[in-house]
Every structure is written in C-alpha cells, then in structure tokens.
Image: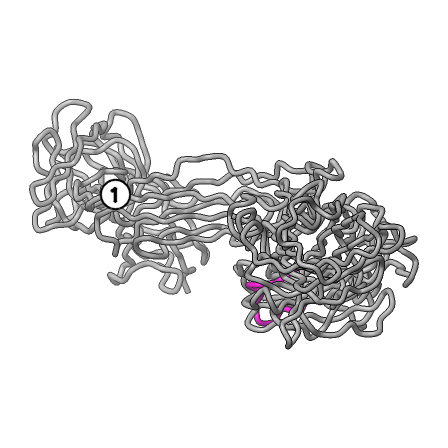
C-alpha cells in the first residue's frame, strides 16, 4: 500500500524552469543511509535515527518536489498551530526551504522541497528528530510483548515527481524498540500491628535508617545503554520513573529520598540490601556523567509536570497519599550513555501501632513516565510512555535466587464434611523458596456462600510461616455446600489460592454414649446392680428416653442432651452387659460394661448433720453428734455385705445404722457418731463394703467438723 501511494503521488518538477515530465532517465542518484538507535519499547514519542540522502547530480541542476516518509507505526512529532511538525530537514547542513507536515497517522512530508546541485555536484539531505510510537499504538501485535525483541521501525521513502532521483533503497530501518525498564522489588510494604516508627527529623535519610523505620527497596535497571536519559535536545523532561502505590491504610505516611545516586556514582544510594550491606544516602554530583534521580513533586496523575525541588543527598520528601493511594515520580538528571546503570529506590513507611493485625492489600507498580494517559498522540510531550508491565532485572545481575523471595504453597486437603457444631483444623505450610528471608504476605478469605466459617490464625506476617485454618460448621448453618477461597498474597514473591469446600451434613440425632460413671462419685468402673449411675454422651434428650442392659430397662431419673441419671436393674445376669440408650425410638450403639455386686460411691453433697441440714464448711457437724451419709452401690441387690466406715483416723465397724435408705431403692444410708474429742477440722470419710467378697471402699469425700463446746 505504501509503495502504491508512492507511485501515484501527484508530482511537480522543474529543471531550471524547463518541464521534464517526459524525461525517463533519473537526473541524479542518491545513496540512502540511516542510523538505527535502540529506542524504548514502552515509548510513544521516541526519537528515531537520522535518514541521510547522499545525492550526486549535474552542477546547477535545481530539484523541486515532495519528499514523503512512511513509517510502519504512528508518527508522534509535535504539531504547531500552523500544522507543521518539529521533524528537521537540512540540505548540506542548512535548514531546508520547507517544514514537515503530517499526512495521516504514519506519513510525514516535506512538500515543495527545493535545492540546487553545487559545483561539486553533491548534496546531502538529512532528516532528523522524527518521533514515533515504538509501542506500535499499544496494540498486542506487533510486537506481542514489547521489547522482547522489538519489531524494527522502518521508513519507506518516496520523492515525486519520479525519475528525478534514483535511490539505492526505498526502505530504511530507523529504530529498534527494546524494553528500557527492568525492576526488582525486594520487599512489599505490608503493614502489621507492630507499626513503623518515624524519626523526629523527617528530612534526613540517615535519621530514617537510624530509627529503623520500615522500608522497601526497588532496584531499577536500564534495559539498554542510555535507556535512562536526562533532559536534552528537544525533550521536555528527562526520563521519569513512576512508582504508584495503592491500598495503604489511612494513617500511613510514605517517604523517599529527594536525590538518588545511581550505581555509577562514587557513593551510590543504598539501604544495605541487595547484598552489599552498605548503607548510605548516596552522593550524586551534577555534571559527573553518573546516574542520578531526583524526586519530582506535584505532578499530574500521569507523572507529567511538577517541579524538582532544590535538594542534596540525605534529604527526604513525603509522598502524599489520598484514599490510600499515591505517586512517587523520579526524573533522570544524569547518566552515562555508554553504561547500563541501575539505582536503588527505598520507600519508607510510617505507621502507628495497632491492636489488630492490618489486612490491607497493598500494591506498588512501576513504569516509565510521563505516561500517555488519554492524550492524543499528536499532542504528546517528549518523552511519553505506556505503562507496560515491567520485567525483573535479576537476570541482568544473575541474582534471581539471591535477593528475591519466592512463595511456596504446597497443595493440601481443603474438602471437609461436618455436622452443625463441628469443626476441622488444617494447616497451610507456607514457605519461602527464594534467597531473601523477608517475605511479607497477607492471608484473606473470599466467601462464595455464607461468611465467618473459616478462621485463620494470622492475616499477615513479614516472613513465611505455617497458617492454621479452622473450618467451623456453626449450629446456624443449614445443611448444604459452602465454598470459599483462601488467598496467600506475597506480592512479587507469588500468590497462592486454596479453594475450600465445606459440606454441612444434616444434624446427627443418634444417641451416643461416651462415659458411664458412678452416680455418686462420678468414677468410671464396673456397674453395680441396683445402684445409681450417670451416663454422659450426645443427643440424650427427647420425648422418650430409655436405658437398657441386655434389653432390661433401667429406671431413668434425669435426662438432658448430654447426661442421663438412672438406676441399674437389680437382676442383671453375668459379669458383662450391653448398655443401649434409645431416644425417641433411635438407639445408640451398644456399649459393653462390666457388672459387679457393689461399687460404693458417696454422694457429694450427701452428708446431713444431726439436725437434717447439709454438712458444709459453713455448717459443720458438732463433735459428739450423729451424721447421715448417703451412698449407692454399697449393698448387693439382696442386701448382702458388711458396711464399715473410714472417718479421719478411725475405722468404724459398728456404725449406728448401715443399710438401705428408707423408701428409696438403690440408695444406702450410714449413720455414724462423730467422736466427741474431734477438734474443729475438715477431714474425709469413706464407706466400705464386703458385698463383692472383698472389702472395697468408696472414694473419700470431705466432712466438716466443729469441736464441741
């Protein structure tokens, strides 16, 4: 298409006032050469290489015509109010008689160009300061990934009328896009409840370091020599680097150095990371041909405009934050175009201590600046860029595994089945597989159904650590499927997602037996016939509650959701029995219990003073009075067994009364006289029996005695 346009362009030509439209052979010939500089693949107003026409022709011949240049991308030169552009055409070193104009998006033209061959028959035409969009309009193609490598920018040349100038080529290469900004960020600024204390002197880099204010360092490196360019020629600014911060809490404050000395400076700016251990605000000397960056204040959101304050090394400036977002802009103010240089940009954060861990999701992105934004290409300033995602510079320095942290998040089971009221615990074994031990991360939960049913034991930390997750099926959760995603975000170190699935089952109403205990002493052991016992478990209450031993019903005295008190049948046969609980007709699994003749247990409280009141520390029995002790499991079902007592330091074999408690089956009563000489004290009493063939005693219980007056 471009060649066709060249062939059909209207021509006007004169040779010393004589028409040459019918002439066939070219009057002169031109050898065309060009410079192919490396340009920013992120740039939309990149300065292309010069195009040179070295022409020879008859002395005194005047050439008049139109010179057109067609690029394979958009021409982005500035336009004046009259429509001319700032591309420059010279003839033998002097400005040509015409200025360039834009014809469409990708064509510039010098119409009405006129020159005369001198006595030596040589004329040199030079086109310079062509500006072009090296991102190819920001489209995905070409190239698919700008700068890896960039598609060459070419210029196709046309001069009309034809047959005046013979070219040795029609197309020249004038630019090679390459990624210009490489970045490695060691730390992501993630605040925690510990906070970050600011120094008293907010204007001193050294004061921030001395106070140990928390910081994050980003290393920026040129993708090619001279990718970081100070202001020069027709540029409006030097190359700028934009750090864009989002997600910060409302009480955060950010600070950066006002001046940063790059790697080629005698003393570079360094916070001690990136392996050197050297800490210094740096020392940049203007005019030293070393890399220097200066903070630019009050720019617009695209990093354009603003001003560079008068500052020296060791000075700091604050980055304003609005709704948790802010912009730090640095401009290149010096550099060596023969070297690939880098600079370290530390960002310090001030943050108050908080009771709770902060869960802010922070983001820091970098790009060249100023950015094009929504400006039309025809009105851009020099330079301008698109915000392409940056790549790490660790390959340049072969330190990818030295300073970078790398999130390790091995898979784990995250599928659970629970009934309401149940819970499960799982651990995410988060590790750092990189060379930098510092790996700030946040942990958060995104619910698809329900909320609050996942608990994490941390929401953020500064280093890798296991994270314990508790999944809870609350009693209010209806049966069904609940899903959520746990996200571990370690910034540049990586992001891990765990999909959690909880199936809440219908409530289990089946009775469950967990313990069978003596109803008086709450001790575990054999079950005594005709004695009171307590059963512990789940789902033990209902409209109908039954307890059976080998099918024989026990007398239920009390029942709740977790406890049943009952009297064991007196006619159990054998030494074992199958215990079953039924609630509303639903039976538990059978529990095998040992069966015995006696298993004494004293109720507590279960001792009455002589006046019928309960024995207690505030109501002791008087020495010389009779107390009543109530127990169960002391006598066999047929009343067999001799009963005695252990009271303090005495064994009493002949209590005043020892037998069944009147009117209450399964309950035994022992009346005993307290020796009159006993002092005021709290001591112990046990009830013993021989009903099993050997003497066994209950667990001791406390008895409170007051000395007789």
Image coords of residue 689 (percent x, y): 27, 34
Colour setting: one colour
Q: Position of residue 466 (x, y in %)?
A: 54, 42
Indicate whether residue 189 is drawn in magenta. no
Total numbered circles: 1
| Residue at 89% in and 54% down | 119
Query: Quadrant location of residue 209?
Result: bottom right
| Residue 33 seen | no
Q: Which residues are magenta?
A: 243-253
As rendered, which of 375 and 333 lies closer to the eye?
375
Of residues 127 and 7, the one drawn nearer to the viewer in this rendering: 7
Q: Quadrant of residue 432?
A: top right
Q: Quadrant of residue 382?
A: bottom right
665 sits left or right of 180 in the view: left
Magenta-drawn stretch contains 251: yes
Mark 1, secondary structure of its residue: strand
Instruction: Find residue 417 and report its horizontal and vertical position in percent.
Output: 29, 40
Q: How busy is the neighbourhood of tag 1: few (under 14 within 10 Å), some, or many (20 plus)?
A: some
Q: Is residue 692 above or below residue 612?
A: above
Depicted 590 relative to depicted 197: above or below: above
- Residue 165 visible to the viewer: yes
Q: Nearer the viewer, residue 169 or 242?
A: 169
Residue drawn where x is 8% and y is 37% of the image: 553
Classify residue 584 as left or right of residue 138: left
The outermost residue toward the bottom is 81
Judged from this view, the residue extending furthest toward the top is 574
Q: Position of residue 660 (x, y in %)?
A: 16, 43
The C terminus: image quadrant: bottom left
Front in this rendered view, residue 606 or 193: 193
Q: Is residue 676 left or right of residue 694?
A: right
Per the image, the residue denoted by label 1 is 536
Looking at the image, residue 290 sits to the left or right of residue 245; the answer is right
């Amino acid at each position: 298409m471009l060649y066709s346009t060249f062939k059909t362009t209207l021509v006007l030509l004169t040779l010393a006032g004589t028409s040459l439209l019918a002439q066939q052979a070219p009057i002169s010939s031109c050898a065309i050469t060009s410079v192919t500089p490396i340009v920013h693949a992120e740039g939309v107003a990149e300065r292309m290489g010069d195009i040179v026409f070295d022409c020879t022709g008859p002395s005194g011949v005047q050439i008049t015509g139109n010179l057109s240049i067609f690029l394979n991308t958009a021409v982005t030169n500035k336009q004046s109010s009259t429509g001319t552009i700032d591309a420059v055409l010279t003839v033998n070193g002097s400005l040509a008689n015409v200025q360039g104009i834009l014809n469409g998006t990708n064509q510039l033209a010098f119409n009405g160009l006129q020159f005369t061959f001198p006595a030596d028959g040589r004329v040199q035409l030079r086109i310079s300061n062509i500006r072009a969009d090296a991102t190819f309009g920001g489209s995905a193609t070409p190239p698919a990934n700008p700068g890896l490598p960039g598609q060459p920018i070419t210029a196709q040349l046309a001069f009309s009328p034809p047959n005046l100038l013979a070219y040795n080529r029609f197309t020249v290469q004038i630019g090679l896009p390459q990624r210009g900004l490489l970045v490695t960020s060691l730390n992501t600024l993630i605040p925690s409840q510990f906070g970050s204390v600011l120094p008293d002197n907010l204007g001193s880099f050294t004061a921030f370091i001395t106070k140990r204010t928390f910081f994050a360092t980003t290393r920026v490196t040129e993708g090619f020599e001279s990718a970081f360019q100070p202001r020069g020629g027709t540029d409006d600014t030097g190359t700028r680097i934009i750090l864009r911060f989002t997600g910060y809490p409302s009480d955060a404050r950010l600070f950066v150095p006002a001046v940063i000395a790059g790697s080629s400076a005698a003393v570079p700016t360094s916070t001690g990371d990136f392996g050197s251990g050297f800490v210094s605000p740096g020392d940049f000397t203007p005019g030293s041909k070393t890399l220097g960056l200066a903070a630019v204040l009050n720019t617009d959101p695209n990093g354009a405009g603003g001003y560079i304050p008068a500052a020296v090394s060791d000075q700091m400036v604050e980055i304003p934050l609005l709704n948790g977002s802010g912009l730090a802009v640095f401009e290149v103010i010096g550099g060596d175009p023969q070297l690939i240089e880098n600079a370290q940009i530390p960002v310090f954060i001030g943050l108050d201590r908080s009771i709770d861990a902060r869960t802010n999701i922070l983001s820091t992105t970098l790009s060249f600046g100023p950015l094009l934004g929504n400006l039309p290409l025809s009105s851009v300033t020099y330079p301008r860029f698109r915000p392409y995602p940056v790549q790490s510079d660790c390959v340049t320095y072969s330190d990818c595994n030295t300073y970078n942290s790398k999130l390790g998040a091995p898979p784990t089971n995250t599928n659970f089945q629970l009934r309401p009221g149940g819970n499960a615990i799982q651990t995410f074994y988060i590790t750092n597989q990189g060379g930098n031990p510092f790996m700030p991360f946040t942990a958060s939960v995104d619910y698809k159904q329900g909320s609050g049913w996942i608990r994490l034991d941390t929401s953020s930390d500064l280093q890798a650590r296991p994270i314990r997750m508790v999944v809870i099926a609350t009693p209010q959760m209806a049966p069904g499927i609940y899903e959520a995603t746990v996200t571990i975000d370690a910034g540049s170190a990586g992001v891990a997602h765990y999909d959690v699935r909880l199936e809440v089952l219908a409530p289990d109403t089946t009775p469950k037996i967990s313990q069978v205990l003596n109803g008086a002493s709450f001790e575990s052991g054999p079950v005594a016939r005709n004695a009171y016992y307590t059963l512990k478990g789940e789902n033990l209450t209902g409209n109908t509650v039954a307890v059976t031993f080998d099918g024989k019903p026990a007398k239920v005295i009390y029942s709740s959701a977790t406890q049943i008190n009952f009297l064991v049948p007196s006619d159990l046969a054998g030494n074992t029995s199958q215990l079953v609980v039924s609630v509303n007709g639903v039976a538990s699994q059978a529990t095998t219990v040992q069966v015995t003749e006696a298993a004494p247990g004293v109720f507590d409280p279960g001792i009455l003073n002589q006046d019928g009141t309960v024995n207690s520390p505030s109501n002791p029995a008087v020495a010389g009075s009779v107390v009543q002790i109530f127990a169960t499991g002391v006598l066999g079902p047929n009343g067999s067994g001799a009963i005695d007592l252990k009271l303090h330091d005495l064994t009493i074999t002949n209590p005043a009364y020892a037998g069944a408690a009147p009117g209450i089956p399964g309950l035994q009563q022992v009346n005993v006289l307290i020796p009159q000489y006993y002092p005021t004290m709290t001591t112990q009493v046990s009830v013993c029996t021989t009903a099993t063939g050997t003497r066994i005693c209950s667990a001791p219980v406390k008895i409170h005695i007051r000395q007789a007056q």
